Image (cartoon, rainbow, N blue to C red):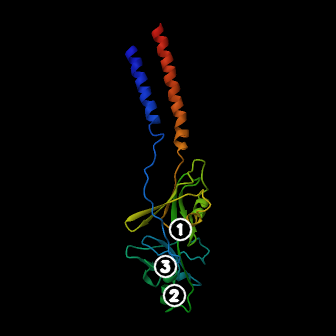
Amino acid sequence: MKQLLQTGCLLLLCLLTSCTQNLFQSASKTEYKKLTLDPEYQYQIRKDDKLSVSVWDHEELSVGSIYSIYNSNEVYGKWLLVDAQGKVALPKVGPFQVEGLTVPEAEANLKQVLSQWVVNPQVNIKVLNKQVTVLGEVNTPGNLLLEKERNTLVEVLGRSGDFNEYADKEHVKVLRSIGAQVHELEVDLTRADNLDLTNIVVLPSDVVFVPARNGKQFNKKSGSTLAVASSITAFIVLTRLIFSL
């Protein structure tokens, strides 16, 4: 019986150790590179983008037209997928190259093609899947569609439901893939003199990460730690009672 009780105490002590082992681990520091953006930046259409194409008063030439009574968004409407060759298949036009073009450039090229059949065609092309991923300590994490051409970090965080109670506002990170490299910028949103960083433009496919304050781990694990500690105390008291008999 004595050996069994000693084994039980050791198991409980191991459990307590595992609960507290990661409480005060600090993240490794990395060297951050400031993300720069050309003031004349415009999104360039990519492979696998979903596009709607609208030609005013020509429903037969349109796909997911904004002029139609039918919804043209990514979830419910019709759209064209940019294929592996960077093209979309347009009604009457056939394969049409769009990869690497800005939306105005693609619209201008399509107007030129459609002018063979339509007098002064009014064309609107929309990218339906431009989105940024927001993770961490915000109230509504996940993928966020970007409707505008330029969206600031503060706007994106606001649309994600703002910070929750555990958010570390001093170390908000923006991650961006440029070629084969991932560039990372850390922003302190508690500083009023940081407007150049807090107003950084977030691009489609960026990841915004809001880490947790160090206290979150303690708050979440303190309850289970106290429970284990109480169990050990009760176990010790019980052991002493048994051995005193």
Q: In which quarter of the image is the N terminus?
A: top left
- Identify residue type, mark 2: Lys
Of circles 1 and 3, the one toward us is: 3
For the residue labelled by badge 1, is the local secondary structure a helix, a strand or a loop? loop
* x and y percentages locating residue 24 in the rendered image: 48, 41
Considering depth in this image, is 46 or 85 the residue closer to the camera?
46
Which residue in the protein does label 2 denote? 111
Residue, x 48% and y 67% (percent of image)?
35
* x and y percentages locating residue 229 in the rendered image: 51, 27
For the residue labelled by badge 3, is the local secondary structure a helix, a strand or a loop? loop
- Placement of 56 over or under 4, stated as above or below: below
- Placement of 210 over or under 113, stated as above or below: above
Extreme residue in the top direction = 245
* x and y percentages locating residue 115 in the rendered image: 51, 91
Task: State the mark number for residue 102.
Answer: 3
Considering depth in this image, is 139 or 37 the residue closer to the camera?
37
Mark 2–mark 3 distance (CA, rounded to whole Å): 14 Å
The reply to whether residue 1 is visible in this rendering is no
- Identify residue type, mark 3: Thr
**Which of the 4 quarters of the picture holds residue 219?**
top right
* x and y percentages locating residue 26 in the rendered image: 46, 46
- Mark 3: few, some, or many residues within 10 Å (few <14, many ≥20)? some
Looking at marks 1 and 3 on the same chain, the residue that comes earlier in the sequence is marked by: 1
- Mark 2: few, some, or many residues within 10 Å (few <14, many ≥20)? some
Task: State the mark number for residue 74.
Answer: 1
Mark 1–mark 2 distance (CA, rounded to whole Å): 23 Å
Of circles 2 and 3, the one toward us is: 3
